[in-house]
Amino acid sequence: MGKSSVNRIGIITGGGDCPGLNAVIRAVAKSAMGQNNCTIIGIEDGFEGLVEGRMHQITDKEVSGILHIGGTILGSSNKGDPFHYPIDNFNGKVEIADESQRAVRNYKRWSLDALVAIGGDGTMHISNKMAELGLNIIGVPKTIDNDLFATDYTFGYDSALFVATQAIDRLHTTASSHHRVMVIEVMGRYAGWIALGAGIAGGADVILIPEIPFDWKIISDKVKERNLSGKKCSIICVAEGAKPAGGDVMVKEMDERRTDARRLGGIGEKVAQQVEHDSGLETRVTVLGHLQRGGSPTPFDRNLSTKFGYKASQLAMQGKFGEMVALQGTEVVSVPIQEAIAKQRLVPPDCQEILSARAVGTCFGDM
């Protein structure tokens, strides 16, 4: 194979931050610079930077020593969708505009041959639309929610799972000391992977996820049953997108700057109030929130991010655009971005994790 025609590669980190982003940036930059002598352009603050023209050239020194550091050295934003771009008017109101052509102009002005877009479901949807406008894009799946179709895991999920599991471990000790019910609310939006994984690993007695609508009475009966059998504490792990049968998710606030304006939250407090009311048992709630996004990536996420970044740089050199890197089994492969966003990767209610959890007595609020 002759020398690649790709000489200038842009890197962008879109959406919410999570551990492993810097590891991907490092892998893309070091492999492309070291093996192909490419120039690497870091686009600042996600798609906001692509629209507004903020970038800088990444050096080898800048990406050295960042493998273990959480967050992103480039900055990120979940409010910079070029097709749904918020603009502040002089009257204090926000106007939503299509600024995608500004993004295209900056891509061309910077003479980019390819753009590696690191992000979750929202970033991949934007990337697919930007590819339709002529940009050479390669996607890298990042989200603590683990809800991107076509990849077994997204990086960031394992790190968030570790934090949530540690939190449940700590709640066990205080719950048993005070004979309380402890409710812990975790992230995940419309997918219950974090709640399911952490709930099983942490030995939660009740796990509530969006994919299995729950019944209030069943939850309270489970807690009361445990108490009557001499088990003086219970742990309930609830995903922020969990909802009762016939009900809807709880929305903390609406933010029109975001493509999906709904910011979820509050279900943990509601569950705690209802359980205490129905059971008469003292109940407390802990909302993990952005603690799940912070800190250093786990070894699994560091390794996965490195493999993802290397594969993305390979795809760029090979001119294979419109693709997203993905973990399938033990191998990192590539799939069309369109395939990755065809649907969300949600928890199948009959998956082995749920069946095994039910077998050891875990309640999902539905039976």
Image: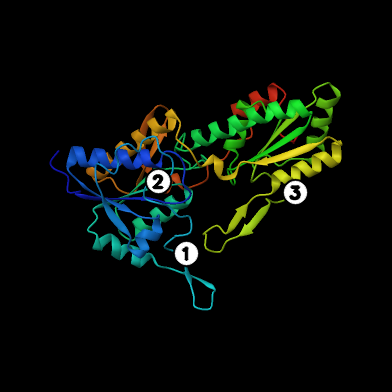
- Which disc, if any, is residue 72? 2
Quadrant where the C terminus sits is top right
Q: Observer-nearest residue: 266 or 262? A: 266
Picture quarter containing residue 188?
A: top right
Residue 225 spot, x, y in % from top left = 83, 27
Compared with residue 329, is residue 81 higher up or lower down, i.e. above or below? below
Picture quarter containing residue 350?
A: top right
For numbered disc 1, what is the local secondary structure? loop
Amino acid at circle 2: Thr
Amino acid at circle 3: Gly
* Marks 1,3: beta carbons within 8 A: no
Could you give the CA–CA distance between mark 1 and mark 3, rounded to whole angstroms?
31 Å
Residue 201 spot, x, y in % from top left = 60, 26
Choose the circle earlier in sequence order: 1 or 2: 2
Q: Is residue 244 visible?
A: no
Disc 3 crowd rating (10 Å Cα; few below 14, some 14-19, many 20+) is few
For numbered disc 2, what is the local secondary structure? loop
Q: Observer-nearest residue: 240 or 214? A: 240
Could you give the CA–CA distance between mark 2 and mark 3, rounded to whole angstroms?
40 Å
Q: Is residue 273 visible?
A: yes
Compared with residue 312, is residue 7 higher up or lower down, i.e. above or below? below
Amino acid at circle 1: His
For numbered disc 3, what is the local secondary structure? loop
User: Which residue occupies 44% across, 60% down?
Assistant: 80
- Which disc, if any, is residue 146? none
Residue 42 spot, x, y in % from top left = 31, 51
Q: Which residue is mark 1?
A: 84
Disc 1 crowd rating (10 Å Cα; few below 14, some 14-19, many 20+) is some
Given this view, does label 1 or label 2 mark the residue nearer the observer? Answer: 2
Q: Which residue is mark 3?
A: 246
Choose the circle earlier in sequence order: 1 or 3: 1
Choose the circle earlier in sequence order: 2 or 3: 2
